[in-house]
Image: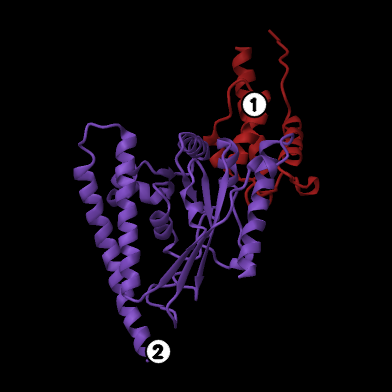
């Protein structure tokens, strides 16, 4: 009954986002926080967002759609959006 | 005398706005009825439409010149005739697009999403094959790269809107992203209006004291690969290229 599924925590996702922002979008490590706003604080535009989501694909089987991204404003929102897909997928795996 | 001149230009400006509105509407109607039904390839229709738009833009500028509303100069004219380039221009006034459409051969444009949805303008925009900016960056990028790859010239105002303060000109990264995706050369065009007129948030009836002169200068093209570090990510390259473009514009606009 009890099947162990390898699943990512919110912390894993946050860490990966922080790394990508610093390495690929010239964001200063000190500016990264859960509350930081992607567009206003970190100068991430819609094209960057597409590239960011491509980088985060490794967490999920299905792509986290850009529709989810439209309601996203802070890094915390991205973490939640990716995490909810991760959860859905691990639940459907268990069934 | 100066006051009389200014009064005249106020009247003539109002008239010009009216002519633009009516003229664009009639042109659209004519194009849609005459060009749409032909059983020819879409690209041929695009070309006819763009040539008609160019004639309209030229006629319109000529009219404003005859009315004594403005003078204009084109510098390095051969630079306007390139193919398969991404033309990037600063955007000091409402007339910039009209001047660019008059001087470039038959360019493709990126147009505001609102215009592409407006029933009055959408038919012509589709007929001309212009690319609507509807907020879907991915779609915009692929459309733009495709147009350039088949040898068309694409025009974009990389500031995304009219310049507010030339000294603090701030480019968005869309233009750089397009050039990187299309692997094409960039042709900067410097537009200067002296004295300034029809800036953002400036109503049409606020005519300048003297007749403004519009100068459009085509600079030499920029080879994208020379300005970016190919080892770095797409995001970093777009930032490097945007910084370079920004310096090009700022240097040119400060010299003036």
- Give B163 or B67, whichever is nearer the viewer: B67
- Give B233 or A75, whichever is nearer the viewer: B233
Residue beneath label 2, please? B2
Task: Name the secondary structure under disc 1.
Answer: helix
- Give B195 or B104, whichever is nearer the viewer: B104
Disc 2 or disc 1, which is closer to the eye? 2
Chain letter of mark 1 equals A
Return the x and y of residue B179 as percentages of the image width and height. 57, 41
Kindly indicate whether the residue at mark 1 contacts the one at mark 2 (C-beta within 8 angstroms).
no
Q: Residue at x 36, y 47 (%)?
A: B116
**Crowding near the residue tagged with mark 1, few <14, some 14–19, many ≥20 C-alpha atoms within 10 Å:** few
Task: Name the secondary structure under disc 2.
Answer: helix
For the C terminus of chain B, the quadrant is bottom right
Chain A colour in the picture: red
Return the x and y of residue B140 as percentages of the image width and height. 48, 39
Residue at mark 2 to residue at mark 1: CA–CA distance? 66 Å
- The reply to whether residue A43 is visible in this rendering is yes
Q: Residue at x 40, y 73 (%)?
A: B70
Chain letter of mark 2 equals B
User: Do the residues marked 2 and 1 share a common chain?
Assistant: no
In this rendering, the answer to whether A29 lies above or below A68 is below
Q: How is the image coloured?
A: by chain
Residue A57's label in the rendered image is 1
Return the x and y of residue A50 as percentages of the image width and height. 59, 36
**Quarter of image, res A61:** top right
Q: Residue at x 30, y 57 (%)?
A: B56
Residue A93's label in the rendered image is none
Number of marks drawn: 2
Shown in purple, the chain is B
Return the x and y of residue B157 as percentages of the image width and height. 51, 54
**Crowding near the residue tagged with mark 2, few <14, some 14–19, many ≥20 C-alpha atoms within 10 Å:** few
For the N terminus of chain B, the quadrant is bottom left
């Amino acid at each position: 009954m009890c099947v162990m599924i390898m699943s990512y925590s919110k912390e894993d996702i946050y860490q990966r986002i922080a790394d990508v922002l610093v390495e690929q979008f010239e964001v200063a490590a000190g500016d990264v926080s859960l509350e930081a706003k992607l567009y206003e604080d970190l100068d991430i535009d819609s094209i960057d967002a597409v590239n960011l989501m491509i980088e985060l694909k490794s967490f999920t089987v299905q792509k986290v759609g850009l529709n989810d991204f439209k309601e996203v404003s802070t890094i915390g929102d991205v973490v939640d959006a990716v995490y909810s897909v991760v959860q859905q997928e691990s639940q459907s795996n268990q069934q | 005398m100066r006051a009389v001149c200014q009064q005249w230009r106020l009247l003539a400006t109002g008239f010009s706005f009216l002519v633009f509105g009516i003229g664009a509407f009639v042109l659209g109607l004519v194009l849609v009825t005459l060009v749409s039904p032909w059983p020819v390839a879409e690209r041929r229709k695009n070309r006819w439409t763009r040539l008609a738009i160019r004639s309209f833009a030229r006629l319109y500028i000529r009219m404003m010149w005859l009315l004594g509303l403005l003078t204009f100069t084109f510098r390095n004219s051969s630079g306007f005739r390139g193919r398969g380039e991404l033309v990037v221009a600063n955007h000091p006034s409402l007339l910039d697009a009209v001047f660019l459409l008059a001087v470039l051969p038959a360019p493709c444009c990126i147009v505001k999403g609102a215009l592409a949805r407006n029933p009055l303008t959408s038919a012509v925009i589709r007929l001309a094959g212009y690319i609507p900016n509807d907020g879907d960056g991915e779609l915009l990028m692929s459309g733009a790269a495709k147009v350039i790859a088949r040898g068309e010239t694409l025009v974009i105002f990389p500031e995304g809107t009219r310049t507010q303060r030339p000294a603090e000109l701030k480019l968005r990264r869309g233009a750089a992203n397009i050039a990187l995706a299309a692997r094409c050369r960039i042709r900067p065009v410097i537009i200067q209006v002296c004295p300034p007129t029809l800036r953002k948030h400036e109503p049409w009836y606020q005519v300048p004291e003297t007749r403004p002169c519009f100068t459009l200068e085509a600079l030499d093209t920029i080879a994208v690969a020379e300005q970016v570090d190919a080892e770095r990510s797409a995001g970093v390259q777009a930032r490097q290229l945007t910084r370079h473009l920004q310096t090009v514009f700022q240097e040119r606009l400060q010299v003036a």
